[in-house]
Image (spheres, grey):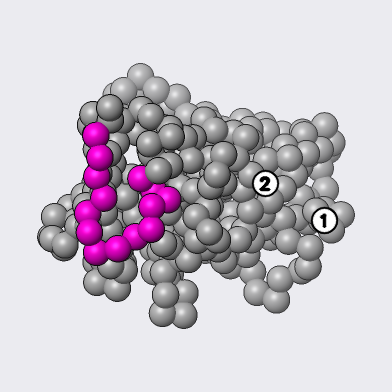
Amino acid sequence: MKYYKDRIYLNISGFFFCLHFRRSRLAFQKEKIKKEILNNYSGFITNEVPTKIDFEIEFINRLSYQLLHDRKNNLQYVSIARNKPGSSSISIFYQTSIYQFQLILRDILLKLLSKNKGFFLHASANNYHGRAILFTGHPNAGKSTAMIFLHDKYQALTDDSAIIKKEKGKFYFYQTPMTEKAFWIKKTSKRYEIDKIFFLRKADYFKIEKITDAECFSKLLIEQFWTKNKTYMREEIKTVLEFISQFKNFNLMYFAKDKNKLLKLLTRRENSMVHSFNKN
């Protein structure tokens, strides 16, 4: 891990960020946010200065607060950053917390992905022989359970959020920088080819069925979008439809809370037959 005095360079899903920490009279705040970023995003820090910067984030002084009042809803807002619409840079005040920074970073990523054939997906994932297998589904479908059950044999890659992005004609999986419940998962800038995507269904038996109905799958996948922001939604849907037309390994997985049987189901040699067996 390396950073250059008052600059840190991040590589997140193939986008390069320059974080510039300006001189500050708030030395404690400056060092605090810098240390938190180094700790939280260590796996995304690049050791070389990128030849191209996709977005610049500068941290600056703000010695006074600007309060915005929403009297209609009885709310108050404190400004934590400023930027110009359409700009590829933003200025963040040193008083900003690491959690607020993450929200800003997420919005920047949504913007970049929408313009570059990518999207966020609610999903867990594991490293399956060097490729990513993704688990998605409705809330409480078992995304985290499946990921944890498989972790001893297949390294966990994410608990709740995934980035799907097209590069040079092919779609890849990237880990997101978002803080998740499974904070122990090691996250990096590495990209993975996608092996399979499973839509999870809780059951008292174990079964994998290949999805062949593209219309049904489109609805299932779009429901798992991270964003409902209309600014990004149109481009994301175009990208999802393109992804569906290109990637063909979508499956339904029915499973119960039995780690060994889930491993057995997944590690069976694949063939054209449907895999299934009962819980008992």
* Left or right of 174 in this view: 17: right
Residue 277 falls within the magenta-colored stretch: yes
Disc 1 designates what residue?
Answer: 2
On the image, the x and y values in percent for residue 61 come to: 73, 42
* Left or right of 169 in this view: 52: right
* Left or right of 111 in this view: 12: right
Where disc 1 sits, the SS reads loop
* Count of numbered badges drawn on the protein: 2
As rendered, which of 194 and 98 lies closer to the eye?
194
Q: Is residue 35 above or below residue 140?
A: below
Q: In the rendered structure, which segment of residues is drawn in magenta?
A: 265-278
Q: Residue furthest right?
A: 5
* Mark 2, other Cα within 10 Å: few <14 / some 14–19 / many ≥20: some
Q: Quadrant of residue 114?
A: bottom left
Q: Quadrant of the C terminus?
A: top left
Residue 219 makes an appearance in the image = yes
* Mark 1, other Cα within 10 Å: few <14 / some 14–19 / many ≥20: few
Residue 156 falls within the magenta-colored stretch: no
Disc 2 designates what residue?
Answer: 41
Amino acid tagged 1: Lys
On the image, the x and y values in percent for residue 201 come to: 24, 38
Residue beneath the point at 29% across and 73% down = 246
Residue beneath the point at 39% across and 23% down = 75
